[in-house]
Amino acid sequence: MALGIGCSSRPGKAPNNKTGSWRVFKPKFNHEKCTKCGMCKTICPEGCIEESEDEFFIPNESYCKGCGLCAEECPSDAITMEQEEK
Amino acid sequence: MLEITEGSHAVAKAVKMSRPQVIAAYPITPQTHIVEALADMVADCELDAEYITVESEFSALSACLGASAAGSRTYSATTSQGLALMFEVCFNVSGMRLPVVMTIANRALGAPLSIWNDQQDSIALRDSGWLQFYAEDNQEATDLHYIAYKVAENPEVLLPAFVCFDGFILSHTYEPVDMLSQEDVDRYLPAYKPVQRLDADDPISMGMYATPEYYLEFRYEHDQAMKRARNAINKAGKEFGEMFGRDYSALVEGYRLEDADTAIIAMGSLCGTIKDAIDEMRSAGKKVGLLKIRCFRPFPAEEIRNALSHVKRVAVLDKNVSVGAKGAVAIEVRDALYGKALPVLGYVLGLGGRDVRISDIRNIVSLAESGKGDQFYGLRTEVL
């Protein structure tokens, strides 16, 4: 997003704001442990976890704030939170 | 046309001829006469502007912020505690890049309460991202308002501007002032054309929040705009000189500086006194000159370096003090001369309306010659 003069902005939608930068911890998905149950997608408060073509689940890093709920709730312990270097 | 007029009224006339569309101000000594005169002009239909009476300076500048965002040329004036109350809004106005022009009738800040002159009020806002002009006399104070609008509204700049003139010393003094005609001002200063404005049919939001990924870049852009203001001032000042004979293209102005051993640096009305003192000292064979800083923001570091390349010492006179450090001008002049083996000696003086006389300037030059500086000058030690 280019800077508007005086931080001005046209009307838009919430997804224009890429909130993923707020993240400190990033979820790491282990596909060997994953049973494709979809709990992570259900629980994600940001709604940013999508199912890929091979039925695994992938978070959209532009919006994932790293809350860790997916890792907490995953019945297979297939998600670990790792500190992200920026 | 030459008129003998009170400084505040000369400023009010210049503001009137700049055709502001919205004025919002709150009266405070010694600024009152300016906004009183403007209120009269609006009431008498001499000036077609919206005059918003507000309950505080915070509201005054907030109203100007909104009006400027909506695309109007706006004006306010204040001083001292009033400016202090505007602190937050000052940063908002400049951050949103709104070219509001505001006169500061410089006055000391309380506590202790003082209605008299020094320049602590505007200096306290030196980091707020406003252009800062300082006038030596009422002619300059008047002319600088046209320059301020021209520079502030330049699409390369888009920053608000303070036009500072010393409270009482200039604001309440009658001097001959060459007032431009309305036709002249209209030729020099066409109507404000905003680059962007609030418009219900084409909505934008201004001053949105910036996450850590963006904030630093916004401040950088702000700083770059201030740097571009240098050129805009050169251009606007030169054009003014070509049209009306008074050239304000330079951010600093030398007086008998060419062969000076001691250079005095000052801002505002103090410069008039210093010029008289220099004439006396020159008659007595002392090579002293003045470098007047007319524009403190953007800070003319390069101009100062060039102007002082030949002098042996620099005495900086500050009507302000950054408590715990020095006078603000002394700090910045020394920074501008970083790497040069040139003594820069600061003197804090004239605070809270203490008169500075020709004899004081002579004494300061003697102190500078003996290498004594970085001190308060003129302390009445008997009351300490």
Image (cartoon, rainbow, N blue to C red):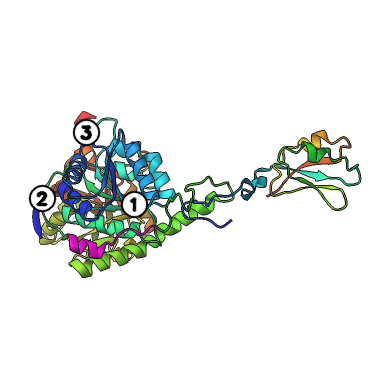
Along the viewing direction, whichever of B133 and B45 lies nearer the viewer: B45
Tell me, yes or no, whether the two marked residues, 3 and 2, touch with CB atoms within 8 Å: no
Among numbered discs 1 and 2, the one appearing first in the sequence: 2
Other-residue count near label 2 (Cα within 10 Å), few / some / many at <14 / 14–19 / ≥20:
some
Q: Position of residue B182 (x, y in %)?
A: 18, 59
Q: Position of residue B98 (x, y in %)?
A: 39, 51
Q: Which residue is mark 3?
A: B381
The nearer-to-camera label among 1 and 3 is 1
**SS label for mark 1:** loop
A23 left or right of A69?
left
Q: Is residue B192 magenta?
A: yes
Q: Which residue is mark 2?
A: B5
Residue type beneath disc 1: Ser
Tell me the distance, in whole angstroms, between the alpha carbons under discs 3 and 2.
39 Å
Among numbered discs 1 and 3, the one appearing first in the sequence: 1
Along the viewing direction, whichever of B128 and B277 lies nearer the viewer: B128
